[in-house]
């Protein structure tokens, strides 16, 4: 027979185990929408000053990003406007921009308009390649608070740094301001759109503040590269004719070799 003391200890152990499991589940629930735990950024005085400063800035970045993610899910403080914010987010995606650019290029009425749309399409492709290269190189995970829906699973990439929406918004905004927009009201509208697209990534907890900030700077500099590599319509025609001539020369050379072998 078991003594009363052993029964009491076993009952206490079961109660403590139940409390521990419940606390563990509660911590998991609370951490499902959190970015980090304080233990992840514990700083030791024995570490170099650069490491301490980097951890401190990273902690500020994560804390500020968490505070701005007010539309991460329906239960968030501003979860009611989440569909509207997602619509703004989609306006900065590469798919509608590329489709609209190609359609305008094909329907262009003047050579100047077609030349502008051609360079915008090339700029979008270059931006997509550069962002994909940096994301694969850095491999920074998205915030834990990020929520993926059925549609966003196909459009949202796995890595976070840098923000492709921010780079695209900054590049397209500067492109439009330099090439197409000539009124003050349209300039305000373009700048407001670029700001809202970048802000939507933070409100939806898609990315961190540093991802968006670096993306804006990268997109602004990206247009300078596009301006230096500007492709004129005459240059494009010369390249196409050059390629056509090379193919024709190869074809004629192949036919000549075939005839020579036949007569030989």
Image (cartoon, grey):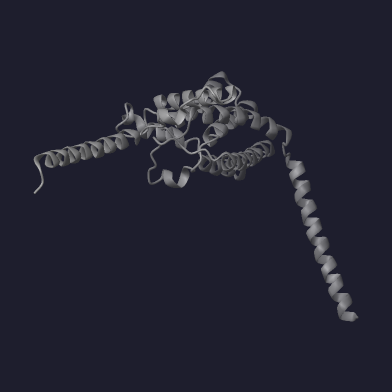
Query: What residue is at 48 percent from the left and 39 percent from the top?
Result: 141
Q: Nearer the viewer, residue 111 or 45?
A: 45
The C terminus, quarter of image: bottom right
Q: Looking at the image, which residue sits at the far top?
A: 184
Residue 62, position as x, y percentages in the image: 45, 27
Q: Nearer the viewer, residue 71 or 97?
A: 71
Residue 224, position as x, y percentages in the image: 68, 30
Q: In which quarter of the image is residue 83?
A: top left
Q: Viewed as shown, does residue 226 lie left or right of 173?
A: right
Residue 69, position as x, y percentages in the image: 40, 28
Residue 153, position as x, y percentages in the image: 43, 46
Using the image, determine if residue 245 lies above or below residue 263: above
Using the image, determine if residue 97 lies above or below residue 252: above
Query: What residue is at 8 percent from the left and 49 percent from the top?
Result: 1
Query: What residue is at 16 percent from the left and 39 percent from the top?
Result: 9
Q: In which quarter of the image is residue 131?
A: top right
Q: Viewed as shown, does residue 237 lie left or right of 58?
A: right
Using the image, determine if residue 145 lies above or below residue 254: above
């Amino acid at each position: 027979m078991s003594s009363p003391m052993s029964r009491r200890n076993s009952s206490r152990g079961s109660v403590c185990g139940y409390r521990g499991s419940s606390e563990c589940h509660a911590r998991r629930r609370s951490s499902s929408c959190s970015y980090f735990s304080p233990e992840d950024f514990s700083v030791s005085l024995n570490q170099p000053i650069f490491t301490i400063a980097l951890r401190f800035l990273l902690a500020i970045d994560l804390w500020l990003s968490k505070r701005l993610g007010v539309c991460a899910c329906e239960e968030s403080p501003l979860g009611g406007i989440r569909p509207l914010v997602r619509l703004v987010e989609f306006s900065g995606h590469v798919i509608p921009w590329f489709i609209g650019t190609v359609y305008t290029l094909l329907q262009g009425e003047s050579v100047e308009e077609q030349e502008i749309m051609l360079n915008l399409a090339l700029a979008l492709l270059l931006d997509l390649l550069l962002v994909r290269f940096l994301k694969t190189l850095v491999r920074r995970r998205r915030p834990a608070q990020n929520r993926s829906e059925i549609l966003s699973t196909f459009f949202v990439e796995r890595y976070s740094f840098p923000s492709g929406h921010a780079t695209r918004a900054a590049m397209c905004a500067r492109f439009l301001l330099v090439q197409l927009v000539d009124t003050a009201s349209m300039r305000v509208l373009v700048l407001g759109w670029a700001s809202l697209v970048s802000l939507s990534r933070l409100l939806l907890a898609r990315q961190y503040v540093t991802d968006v900030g670096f993306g804006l700077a990268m997109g602004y500099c990206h247009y300078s590269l596009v301006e230096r590599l500007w492709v004129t319509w005459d240059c494009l025609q010369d390249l196409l004719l050059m390629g056509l001539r090379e193919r024709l020369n190869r074809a004629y050379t192949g036919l000549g070799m075939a005839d020579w072998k036949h007569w030989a």
